[in-house]
Every structure is written in C-alpha cells, then in structure tokens.
Image: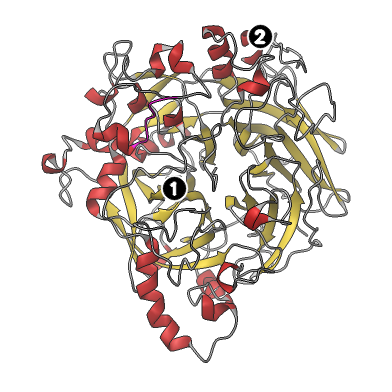
Amino acid sequence: MSRPLKSVFKKEHSDDISNRSDNPVFSTVASAFLSRRRFLQMGVVAGTAVSFPMLLKPEEAFAALTQTTPSTLAKAVSLGFTSIPVSSEDSVIVPEGYIARPFYRWGDATGISGNLPAFKKDASNTTDEQAAQAGMHHDGMAWFSLPQGGTSPDHGLLALNHEYIDNGMLFKDGTANWNLDKARKGQNAMGISVIEVKKQGNGWEVVRPSSFARRITVNTPMQITGPARHNALVKTAADPEGETILGTMQNCANGHTPWGTYLTCEENWSDIFVKKGEMTPLEKRYGIADEDESYRWNEVDARFSVDKTPNEPNRFGWVVEIDPYNPTSTPRKHSALGRFKHEGAAVTLAADNRAVVYMGDDQKFEYIYKFVSDKKYDAANRDANMALLESGTLYVAKFNEDGSGEWLPLVYGQNGLDSSKGFENQGDLLVKTRLAADAVGATKMDRPEWIAVDPHAAGSVYCTLTNNSDRGKEGKAPVDAANPRANNVFGHIMHWLEADSDPAATAFKWDILVMAGRTDGADEKAKGSMQGAAFGSPDGLSFDHRGVLWIQTDVSSSTINKKAYQDMGNNQMVATIPGTNEYRRFLTGPRGCEITGIAFTPDNRTLFINIQHPGEGGDDITDPANPTAVSSWPDADPAGRPRSSTVVIVKADGGMIGT
C-alpha cells in the first residue's frame, strides 16, 4: 500500500527515495516515445488522447483478446450496476441491491480449536489472546475452496494479511511503559490469518472452531528456499546454517497459486529495523532506519536492532508461500523471487506451463519484476508443484522509448552481475536484488503496487502506479507527456502485453490504461483520463472471473478530502472493463480507511474485501485516550475503537457481483 505524503506511523519510510542510481526513469522513456506518437496524432485525436496519446484504446485492448486463456465464466461485456456517489460517511456504502457486512474484525477469534478469546473493546486482550485473534489492519486476501481441489462457492478458506499495527489502538496507554510483552502483542497482531468460512442460508459466517484455523506471526518458524538458503548474508547466531527464519511481517498484497497455496508479500519490513551505527550501502539501499518511534521493537527485542543482529534484515523482504489446507505446514520464504519491498505476487502460467510471478517494489522510483520457474506446473502432482517457486529466473523490466519493453535477467555472471559489481554468487545477488536491478539498467517507476493478469487475455498484465510526490522536483523525474504533473499525487495504471501472448516471453509492448485524477479540475494536466467515476492513488487491483477489473484506492489519511483530493470523498473501489474507459464506483469506505484485499468465490456471487485502518488520523499513532476521534466503524461504539475488518458483499437477489 502507499501514501502520497510521509506518515510518521504507517510505512514511515515509504516516501523516502533509496534508489540513487542513474537508471532511466519511466517518465523520460515515455516522453521520447510519446513525443513521436503525439506528432502523428495531433490534429486527428481530440480531448484526452491528445494529452495522453499513449492511453490504451478500445480497439487495441480488444485486439489483444485474440489469444485467450480459459476462464471459469464468460467474459463481461458491460458493467451492470449504477455508480454510487463519493461519500464522507463513516460506513461502507455499496450500490442499491447489494449487501455488505463486516464479519472478521480485528480481535475476533480466528477459530483455533480450544482458543476462542473474545475481543475486549478497551484493548485489554493479552499477548496470548491476540495470537488467536484476527490481527490488525487487514490487507491482501485470497479464497481457497473446500474440500481441497474443489470449486465450491459456499465453503472455503480465506487467507489474509495483517499488514501493520497501531500501538495507540492496540494498548490502553499506547507506547507508555514499554516492554517486551507489549512488543510481543504487536508481533502477534501482524502476519496472516487462515479462517474457515461457510455460507449458511443467505449469510456467511466464520466457522469456529475449525481444524484449518491458523495465525502466522512474526515469530512463526519458516524455511528459506532457493539460492539464498545457506548464504552468509542470511546467517545469524540463532540460525548459523541460514535455514530457519522466525516470522513474517508487514505483509501487504498477496498472490495465490494454481496448486492451491497462498503467497504473502513482505513490504515495509525495513521500517521496523533500527541501526544506530554507520549504515552499509546495502542497508541504505533498502531504507534501514536510524530511529523508530512507532513500533519500538528494537528497544526490547535484539532481533530488530541491526547493531546487534546485522544480518536479520536480510531475512525479510521475501515472498512467503503458505499451504492453507495444512495448518501444521511450515511456511517457506522463496529467495528465487528476489528481496525488496514486495507489494504483491500475481501468478499465471506460461504457454509451456512454467509458473510466472509478477511483482512490484513499492517505493518511489523502484522496479517491476517477473519470475519464471525452471520446472513446469503439473495439475496432477501437487507435491511436485510445491517446489516450483524454489528455482527459476528473476527478471526486471526495462521500458524502451518505442513502446517496447525487455525483461532483463538478474542472473549471476550475466549482464556484468559478478564480483566486479559486488555480487559473489546468485544467493548474494538475490539478497541484493535492488542493487542488481540498478546494475542492469532497469526503468525507475512511480511506486509499483498491485499487479493483475487478465484471465481472458493471455499475456495481458496491469500494474497500479499509485503516486509520486517527487515527480517534477529538481533533480528528480521531469514533467513530461507520460507524467505531466509536478507533484504527481494521482498516479496511473500501466498495461503491457507479453510477446506472443506468452507470460514467459522476454519482450513486451506497453501502454497506459488510465491516468488517475479528478475529472472536474481546472488544470488540464491534472485531470483523470477516465469516463465516469474519478479516483486517485490506485492501489489494490484484481480481475474477477468475468474479466472485470476492480481498482481500490489508498489516498493518505492525511490527504483524504483535502488538498488535491478535496471533495473526492473517502477511499473507494471502482470497476472497469479494460478498453471501454468507463469507470463506475462500486464501494466507498468509512472515515480514515484504505480499501484493500479482493477475493471472489468461483461463481462470482460473493466478494470479500478488506477495510484497513478505519479511524487513522494520518499524523502519528492514534491517541489511546481518544481512539474513535475519526471513526467508530464497524461497531459504532463510542466507548470502543475502530477495527479493520473483512467485509462480505453479495447481491440481494443472489446474482453475480457486477451484473
């Protein structure tokens, strides 16, 4: 997730710039490419296309559908709901004919057998109780039908992330009287939930107790796989072999595999590590901090003091694979997919059935990556598929001036990636993924966030670029045709089509789906290019089974309804069918929240989304003496506190979502 302005609490360093390389920024590349297209189109294209001649056109979008991949449902040709207006209400609002209900809130029992603690609205739940309850700040999420291997739309598992914590909400007295037990409670409020859910009559409920229910936290043992396993940079005194890592944290977006596993992505993990001594180039490149006034784990837990455990940060920043069907299984951190601030992991299959994973690095001027497995997916052999993400080739994207693109391999011994550039072997290179991407000349992007693969168009991929407040500043990326906004607070959505419609290809063609922004502004260069519902700071991105693209926004809580976003309302979720340029607003959230997490049941009749950090004020941790100052959603209890929640959405008539 992202923030256009620096926040003292959430993602403290997400707006810092760690990339000081001389690699081309996307704006510069696009400017040269688009200036030629502009010359050809001036006088024959009117309106938005003149300002943004690179925008994806309907005829180009539908031409890309000539080679398709199987999907569970027929492709949608239109949106079937009426767009709702913007809202500043402290509630979740959906179109008429839809029902939205929160049903798995922070502090609700996960359903672990024999351990069903109730939420205490005064924040007095213990550290052990929090380990069996929903964590804070729900984020990425995926659906898995039960039984395993089936396609049931009425009974399944939800795996979801709990990205970060707010100590002002989590404790009666905030960070006062700080100690290790408080840090442990915070660690138990991060990580992942696996919950069993079932449709009973016309409603959904969490099954409690459940043999599948599980919480994975900052202290859950995990294995590291791939080239970085046993590497000197991941070894610590507690793990001298470099094999077993404790925990995962700052889990943002996600992915799910064809073989039925969940991928959770470690994003802003560097915010929690603190080093008082002199920083190494690697620590600087990954944004290790010299102070932390929000989490404060480093003060009581030596793992998070880099001065005491210098290699511990290298054990975070990975994609973690979890088997939701086996609650005793050990999660695995796959080093072959690279180490950075992973925003998501969108999985698809290549033409030859190799697994392909698309990933963004969520920080200003960072990169877009792709992993292609060595081995092939076998629908009849789940055990073999479990090793698919352990070996393969990691690539980083370069966007060329002529609208073409290249996937540059990050392989030791190729493209100068050897000891002369500071890499000793492939494992060493992957720990230093950002430095390797710098070295091969990848293209700097404006905060790559979620990536979505069109289920009805092979090789057609989309990526949200949320915003970049440094656009146009002196010494930074210049204002140009592709990014014509100084202080670009609105963002845009990229699209590319892989060569031969094959996700494993090493070449692609690119364009832009939409420039986000308001459609009523006086500044022509700040206007959104969409028709219909205006939005800014696109973040969450996912296709449903019908090929409708759903976009969720993450406008900073310090910016909602202020400044450039005045009168644009709370964060929202909009839908479009790529190529139509029609956008309809489907949902608005409560005050102070971010909309995130998308999971559809196989029949497209139930949608699960997450409301993250309702009530966030935007400047610092919440005042523990006044937790409902901004929001009291979802309980509407002035004596309680706002609670992130999974929301279930259905049509009142039982129809498909979006029809």
Mark-to-mark CA distance, 2 and 1: 36 Å
Indicate the amino acid at tag 2: Thr
The magenta-colored residue range is 286-291
Q: Quadrant of the N terminus?
A: top right
Q: Position of residue 228 (x, y in %)?
A: 28, 30
Relative to 217, 411 lies left or right: left
SS of the residue at dot 2?
A: loop
Dot 2 surroundings within 10 Å: few (below 14), some, or many (20 or more)?
Answer: some
Q: Vertically, is 112 above or below 135? A: above
Relative to 543, 379 lies left or right: left
Q: Is residue 261 visible?
A: no
Picture quadrant where residue 627 is located? top right
Look at the magenta stretch and give its main secondary structure: loop
Task: Identify which residue, 229 or 83, lies in the foreground.
Answer: 83
Q: Position of residue 650 (x, y in %)?
A: 80, 46
Picture quadrant where residue 58 is located? bottom right
Is residue 289 highlighted in magenta? yes
Label tally: 2
Nearer the observer, disc 2 or disc 1? 2
Indicate the amino acid at tag 1: Gly
SS of the residue at dot 1?
A: strand
**Which circle's residue, 2 or 1, is located before the other in the chain?**
2
Picture quadrant where residue 230 is located? top left
Q: Quadrant of the C terminus?
A: bottom right
Q: Position of residue 221 (x, y in %)?
A: 44, 17
The residue depicted at 38 percent of the width and 60 percent of the height is 477
Q: Position of residue 44 (x, y in %)?
A: 53, 91
Dot 1 surroundings within 10 Å: few (below 14), some, or many (20 or more)?
Answer: many
Is residue 36 highlighted in magenta? no
Task: Identify which residue, 547 or 443, lies in the foreground.
Answer: 443
Q: Which residue is labeled 1 in the image?
A: 360
Disc sitting over residue 126 in the figure = 2
